[in-house]
Image: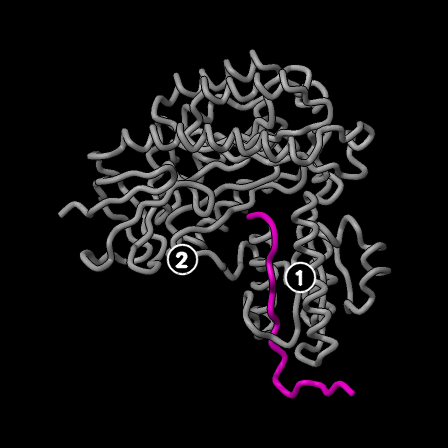
Amino acid sequence: MRTKTLKKNRINVVTLGCSKNIYDSEILMGQLRANDKEVVHEEDGNIVVINTCGFIANAKEESVNTILDFVQQKEAGIVDKVFVTGCLSERYKPDLQKEIPNVDAYFGTSDLPNLLKALEADYKHELLGERLTTTPKNYAYLKIAEGCDRPCSFCAIPLMRGKHRSKPIEELVVEAEKLAAKGVKELILIAQDLTYYGLDLYKKRNLAELLRALVKVDGIEWIRLHYAFPTGFPMEVLEVMRQEPKVCNYIDIPLQHISDPILKSMRRGTTKQKTTKLLQDFRTAVPDMTIRTTLIVGYPGETEEDFQILKNWVGEMRFERLGCFTYSHEENTHAFALEDDVPEEVKQQRANEIMELQSQISWELNQEKIGKTFSCIIDRKEGNYFVGRTEFDSPDVDNEVLIDASKYYLKQGDFAQITITEAADFDLYGTPLD
């Protein structure tokens, strides 16, 4: 018979999925700490909260496996309670309750007060912007909006996150000030769609005004833009990027595809011609801008010709940063009515071809950096290297700058001037400027 653990209740929050989930976990942990609860992130605890991802097949599988693992630990008496929250739970709650009944309770993406109640804590409205950050102390994610109004055929996010809801500028400034007071120097602005920011609150796309307010926050040195939708992009943002040194010359703009028939079926609201012009306008406005994008291959109906159009275009555009995913056939999305007719091995082969091409482009662009000096923020020490980033690189997904720790001493969270001495596909090596 299982015996209850005797240790004091320690809540372990486990985060799966994207940066939006990291942010949500941090808010949850901040609320628990304010309720005098002992809370940790991905460490041992006898009460477990799993913040799940439900976006595509791989992510869902990882989430389910994590739930099953902790349920087994519960059955073995290693943990006492298991709670599940986040996107998978929002999307599949009835199925999960039926298939994995030994979870204590399931909560959706907007169920934070109820989740706190289950953890014997009160939701404190006054904790505006208070959170327990889990990222290295020098950077933090700032979620400026929740949900999405876009009709993209392949995407299940509106099912899990609801309609777009912007946060007021003054609230975001307060949150940024609190982060800066803790030593955060870089804000990474996230949302399902930055481009749409402000339309619901201010009746106009207001990302530029938000940036102008955030650059005034003392202590914040870099502001980075993630997940901007290409259609309707507010071009005045580029003006702010050019004028304000704190706004990194960097944008993450997921384009998904470029062949017109696929873009139409994806319901992206744009064409190859319009997208190409948008990127040319970006480069004209901010010549040294780094553009990161993500692409999907193997979408229903993607022919070899569609794929070659995409591949040739990637070669022409020479993106500084690029990720490529295989299409995942998601129920209740518009594309689910289409036949998932590209074989899995063809999807994978196409993704590999794109990434091989991108690897070559990245290597060539990195060679141009040798001998140049960049301001780098030092994220961590790993093995024999200090690991830093330039303003053109986001954490976890982009290039890193490696500095030999046996020869040089650098401090995590500090900026350092680093001269690049060597370059690989996705790593740069450098030495500090004396």
Extreme residue in the top direction: 273
Q: First in sequence: mark 1 or mark 2?
A: 1
Residue 183 percent location from the top left of the image: 37, 56
Screen quadrant of the N terminus: bottom right
Residue 109 percent location from the top left of the image: 71, 51
Residue 319 has which mark?
none
Q: Does any portion of residue 199 appear in the rendered image?
A: yes
Which residue is identified by label 2?
137
Q: Are marks 1 and 2 in contact (CB under 8 Å)?
A: no
The three-letter amino acid code for the residue at tag 1 is: Thr
| Of residues 223 and 338, the one drawn nearer to the viewer in this rendering | 338
Does 70 appear in magenta?
no
Which residue is identified by label 1?
66
The segment highlighted magenta reads 1-20
Label 2: element kind: loop
Residue 228 percent location from the top left of the image: 55, 31
Vertical arrangement, residue 181 with respect to residue 150, above or below: below
Residue 419 percent location from the top left of the image: 21, 41
Q: Kindly report the secondary structure that dominates the magenta region of the rendered protein.
A: loop
| Of residues 7 and 62, the one drawn nearer to the viewer in this rendering | 62
The three-letter amino acid code for the residue at tag 2 is: Lys
At horizontal 53% and vertical 58% (from top left) the residue drawn is: 130
